Each structure stands twice: as C-alpha cells, then as structure tokens.
Image (spheres, grey):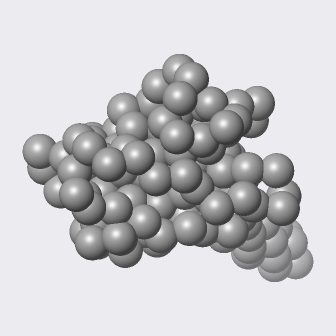
C-alpha cells in the first residue's frame, strides 16, 4: 500500500514538473522562430506576440532607412538580428520615423533586444 502511494506521488510530481516545463518553453523558443536569413520584430517582450519578418531583400540597399509598420498593440517590443555576419540591424526610437532619435539597439547576427517601455519606429541595416 505504501509503495503505491509513493509511486503515485512520484508520477504526479513528474507530471507537474513536465507541465511547468511545457508551459514555459514556448516563450523562450520564440526568438528561434525567426526564419534563417531574416531579422524579426515582435509585439511582445522576449520574442512573444505577433512577429514581423524583415527580409534583407526588402531592406536593401544597405544604409537605407525604413519606417516600421504600426502595430495596433502598441509597437514592436523585441527584435532579433539575423541578416548574417557582417550586417547589423539598427533600431531607432524617433516616433516620426526616418531613423531619427536615439539608436536603441544595434543587433548583429543572432543578437536579441527586448523592452517593455520603449519601441523602435524605424530600422536601418548596416
């Protein structure tokens, strides 16, 4: 009888622990969802929420400023650079677009940025 109680308790513990892992895994995996060769922006922090893919071919030539589309949730709050080695994605804070304001982040290939309070309005590839 005691062995059954211990066995059931262990099964319950494993199930509960596995449930916690399964719940938290998607949030950390979102950055890896960005397609290879592209940079991405998300509406939420840490790669959560709606994703905007930035294909290199749409943001060429290098050094050209591009205003980001408005997101109704309140902006883009996380990003990942992914255009390959030698390229950086610059995020600008100026609400008027045009790559004005402060450079909030310069993201090399595979680097990420996240903020609950600030958001970029335009981007540039260098």
Within the image, what quadrant is residue 73 found in?
bottom right
Image point (22%, 51%), residue name: 62
Quarter of the N terminus within the rendering: bottom right
103 sits to left or right of 57: right
Residue 110 in the image: above or below residue 13: above
Which percent across, then down, holds residue 46? 61, 48
Q: Nearer the viewer, residue 5 or 37?
A: 37
Which percent across, then down, holds residue 95? 69, 36
Image point (53%, 29%), residue name: 100
35 sits to left or right of 97: left
Within the image, what quadrant is residue 111 found in?
top left
Image point (72%, 59%), residue name: 70
Quarter of the C terminus within the rendering: top left
Q: Can see residue 75?
A: yes
Within the image, what quadrant is residue 7 found in?
bottom right
Which percent across, then down, holds residue 67? 55, 52
53 sits to left or right of 27: left
């Amino acid at each position: 009888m005691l062995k059954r109680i211990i066995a059931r308790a262990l099964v319950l513990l494993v199930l509960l622990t596995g449930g916690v892992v399964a719940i938290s895994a998607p949030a950390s995996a979102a950055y890896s969802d960005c397609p290879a060769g592209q940079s991405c922006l998300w509406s939420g922090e840490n790669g959560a929420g709606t994703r905007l893919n930035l294909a290199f071919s749409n943001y060429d030539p290098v050094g050209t400023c591009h205003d980001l589309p408005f997101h109704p949730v309140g902006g883009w709050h996380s990003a990942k650079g992914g255009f390959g080695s030698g390229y950086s994605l610059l995020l600008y804070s100026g609400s008027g677009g045009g790559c004005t304001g402060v450079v909030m982040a310069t993201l090399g290939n595979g680097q990420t940025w996240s903020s609950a309070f600030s958001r970029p309005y335009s981007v540039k590839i260098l």
